[in-house]
Image: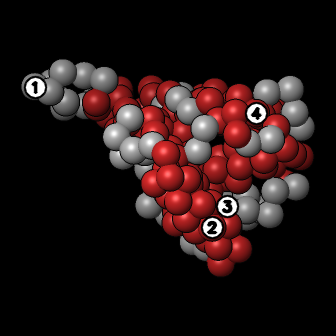
Amino acid sequence: AGLAGGEMGGEAAVVHSAYHRTAQAYYKVVGPPRSFYESALLYLSYTPHDSMTPEERYSLATDLSLAALTGDGVHNFGELVTHPILTALTGTPNAWLLDTMLAAGDGDVARFRQVARDHAAAAARQPALVGRGRAVEEKVTLLAVVDLAFRRGADDRTLTFAEVAERA
């Protein structure tokens, strides 16, 4: 656990922060996106939000959003969409990524598709997304179905095709 868990502080947290900062920088260059995503979230757990410059927060929020959307094996956006790092996208040219992540995190496929349509030109300027639009949409749709199931009680997780079609 990191600083957020309150179990580690002081010098140990600084060492973990530095390690995960290095790991996320490495995975950003060599991939895969999932490893970058995991290392970056761990970096954030050991690094006080206010110790990063606004530019660092913006860059990391952008890269984390792209890694979440494109990373094979990244199937849970909950930790990211609740982290204050995403607020660094507000009022920036990449604010659409915040809207995309929130829609995906909520399992709202219709809103996700609307954001994708409204910001298709901006998405086309992101090399990580070029040619992956369909795969990202499929991922968000699957996440929406899982979200639909888990919003129900543990003894009521049988979904009808109509419910799935309505959500997706």
* Inter-mark Cα distance, 2 to 3: 27 Å
Crowd tier of the residue under label 1, counting other residues whose Cα lies within 10 Å: few below 14, some 14–19, many 20 or above: few
Which-is-in-front pick, marks 4 and 1?
A: 4
Q: Amino acid at mark 2?
A: Thr
Query: Is 127 left, or right, of 108 in this rendering?
Result: right
Q: Position of residue 162 (x, y in %)?
A: 35, 28
Q: Earlier in the sequence, mark 4 or mark 2?
A: 2
Name the secondary structure under disc 3: loop
Q: Earlier in the sequence, mark 3 or mark 4?
A: 4
Query: Is 101 left, or right, of 58 in this rendering?
Result: left
Residue hosting label 3: 132
Name the secondary structure under disc 1: loop
Mark on residue 22? 2
Which-is-in-front pick, marks 4 and 2?
A: 2
User: Going 34% across and 40% down the picture, which residue do you hit?
Assistant: 7
* Inter-mark Cα distance, 3 to 4: 24 Å
Q: Amino acid at mark 4?
A: Ala
Residue hosting label 1: 155
Marks 2 & 3, CB-CB < 8 Å contact: no
Q: Amino acid at mark 3?
A: Arg
Which-is-in-front pick, marks 3 and 4?
A: 4
Q: Amino acid at mark 1?
A: Asp
Q: Earlier in the sequence, mark 2 or mark 1?
A: 2
Name the secondary structure under disc 4: helix
* Inter-mark Cα distance, 4 to 1: 40 Å
Crowd tier of the residue under label 3, counting other residues whose Cα lies within 10 Å: few below 14, some 14–19, many 20 or above: some
* Inter-mark Cα distance, 4 to 2: 21 Å
Vertical position of residue 60 compared to residue 100: above or below: below
The answer to whether residue 138 of the structure is visible from this angle is no
Mark on residue 88? 4
